[in-house]
Amino acid sequence: MKFDTPATQNPIDQLKVVGHGVDRIDGPLKTTGTAPYAYERHDVAPQAAVGYVLGAAIGKGRIGSMDIEAARRAPGVLAVVTAQNAGKLGKGKMNTAKLLGGPDIEHYHQAIALVVAENLEQARAASRLIRVQYERAQGKFDLAAQKSATDKAGKNEPKEDRVGDFESAYAQAAIKIDHTYTTPDQSHAMMEPHASTAMWEGDALTVWTSNQMVAWGRGDVARTLGVPREKVRLISPYVGGGFGAKLFVRADAVLAALGARAAGRPVKVALQRPLIANNTTHRPATIQRVRIGTTQDGKITAIGHESWSGDLPGGQPEEAVQQTRLLYAGANRLTALNLMELNLPEGNAMRAPGEAPGLMALEIAVDEMAEAAGLDPVEFRVRNDTQVDPSKPDRPFSQRRLIECLRLGADHFGWADRSPRPGSRREGRWLVGLGVAAAFRNNLVTDSAARVRLDAAGQVIVETDMTDIGTGSYTIIAQTAAEMLGVPLAKVIVRLGDSTFPVSAGSGGQWGANSSTAGVYAACDKLRAAILQRLGFASDGAVFADGMVTDANGRQATLRDAAAGGDLVAEDKLEFGDLDKKFQQSTFGAHFVEVAVDAATGETRIRRMLAVCAAGRILNPKTARSQVIGAMTMGVGAALMEELAVDDRVGYFVNHDLASYEVPVHADIPSQEVIFLDETDPVSSPMKAKGVGELGLCGVGAAIANAIYNATGVRVRDYPVTLDKLL
Ligand code: MOS
């Protein structure tokens, strides 16, 4: 099904099942511990041996020599895999560094060996017997130092995007600000580590893995191992958190496959927790300069946002300026990305890549600008709204209700009680402040396919390689099929995360919910046609409800009757056309936060949070709310705690475990509220839904920093806002 004109009325609009906050259909499996995760496939791979990964102990250089003999002879050891004995390996499209390093080492904790043994203890003990001699090379590990060296040498080569004449407009602006903000390297810190169980049957490989994007993963496992794609099956039905860490195949999958080949047995590998931060990807640190100039009455005439981030050779910049191209009006604009070469572990996507760190800077700058212009921060944002893409005035937003998010949130949160004078509200030892920030994230869409089967019992079985990373995919897909075919939710069985199923959008970039359900919509639409044809019913105007189908001539049959002569199966793909060219599709929101800061110690407590989101049709308000409050909690981490500390002599992240890389939990925050604006976006898909899982994170950090400023009068521009920066 091609989607190239805005959606009109369709069966989803009935909202008998879609749009209801039903419980997760996979909830009982999760809460009873019976959902099979990748490392626990005793059911299908009962004899799996265990792999333990050895990571490189240098940040850059080479392995001079490596002695694995003692490890090989250690008790229980079945195989030791290294780059020397693994055969020729390729590289995945989505990987910057090799997943099995040696002799060259590209980053700290790059895997250099897998020890396979009968059990974890034996594998771990044997790994300690591997003797490695390294030849260290000089690496570049300090972003700020690289930036100043590049500045000094006049060697910045920014990827710029310009509208109008930023420099003159900024020079002439009546009121202006110019500040630099920094965000640190961050780790996804999902609960389930990267984990895989691999099994060979002849030359065919099955990998049960924890991965967000099954089709990408299948391709990259094949590319890395140099085997045909058709010979690789990837299975990822349950994922214990991803946040972007599992968009790509990592060492666990590739090493499990190599280990299984070497040991002649299924092998399972879970990356050890202390290895994950340096072995896998992370959100790169940024340095961001924001300049804004306004007229005397606070209308933006010039807005400039430049970002610097680093990555390994061949890597990508963190796109921290994306939102600044679209969020506020202003005739003269400059955005620029600068990429520094660093030899730290690989940078890549983490929840809302680009916008999450970008808004942490931009939305403090906007708060500073509002103050300089003598305007309330809500009022300032309202005044600078735009209904079109500022770089292409004939390109409207498909929906843009940022102003309503701000106004409704302000009302609901009691914004009117905020004192505009920082540091003026005190309750005992606590300085209390309120902060606001806009939330913005583009709404990406990705082609998505599904297969739907109707059987003689009247059951509907949906199959697609879509993943559920804790987001609720199973549930919204079941709701979509139930709505389309007029059956109760209990009649729908959803099977996900298997590369033998049709290729879906996968879970990433907050495109998963809207795109994958749209694929299910397309397959169900085809199945409806097949049902009508089987029954000899009129093809137009049929109604599917209560397990019955009624055609335009009033003829009726049950779905069981329709399938009595054999199962009916339909498969289709929702292909997104070029509506994206005519409309800018984005999601919007507003975050409000109340903090209390201990006047003596500088300790910050979050008291209340509110997010108002405008993200198209909300397919399931319960799972969507969970996404948003999870994101808000993650935003608290970004604002107050999260920072991978770089040792710039050795080139690694020092705090590489969950004891030293701290993240908050919901229970740390007494009150979190979410309001969804009641909207549909016919430009987004037949579902008229959009993404919300990343939107919830966008802007939170700045709202907290702004609240801390309002509470204390201390403006911190370097995240995380730890207490030492407030004293
Ligand atoms: Mo998201 S960072 O695309 O999982």
Image (cartoon, rainbow, N blue to C red):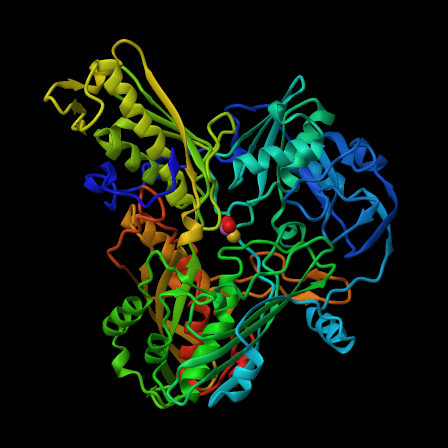
Is 118 situated above or below 95?
above
Which one is nearer the viewer's eye here, 665 or 242? 242
Give the image quarter of residue 208. top right
Give the residue displayed 35% in from the left and 66% down from the top: 387
Residue found farthest to the top: 565
Camera-side residue of 395 and 135 = 395
Between 624 and 296, the one lying in front of the other is 296
Give the quarter of the image for residue 404. bottom left
| In this view, 143 is above or below 397 | below
Left or right: residue 550 compared with residue 400: left
Residue 668 in percent (x, y) is at: 39, 64
Residue 262, picture quadrant = top right
As displayed, is residue 533 above or below residue 240? above
Q: Nearer the viewer, residue 602 or 400?
A: 400
Please give the count of numbered marks on the rendered protein: 0
Above or below for 438 versus 126: below
Residue at 55% in and 81% down = 179
Q: Residue at x 26, y 43 (%)?
A: 8
Q: How far across and how far down the image is residue 280, in percent?
A: 64, 50
Instruction: Tell me if I can see residue 132 in this picture.
Output: yes
The image quadrant where one finds the N terminus is top left
The percent coordinates of residue 341 (x first, y second) are: 73, 62
Q: Residue furthest left?
A: 554
Side of 116 relative to 521 (left or right)? right
> Would residue 243 be seen by someone viewing this image from the given angle?
no
Name the side, left or right, on which 440 lies relative to 198. Answer: left
Residue 662: percent from the left, percent from the top? 53, 62
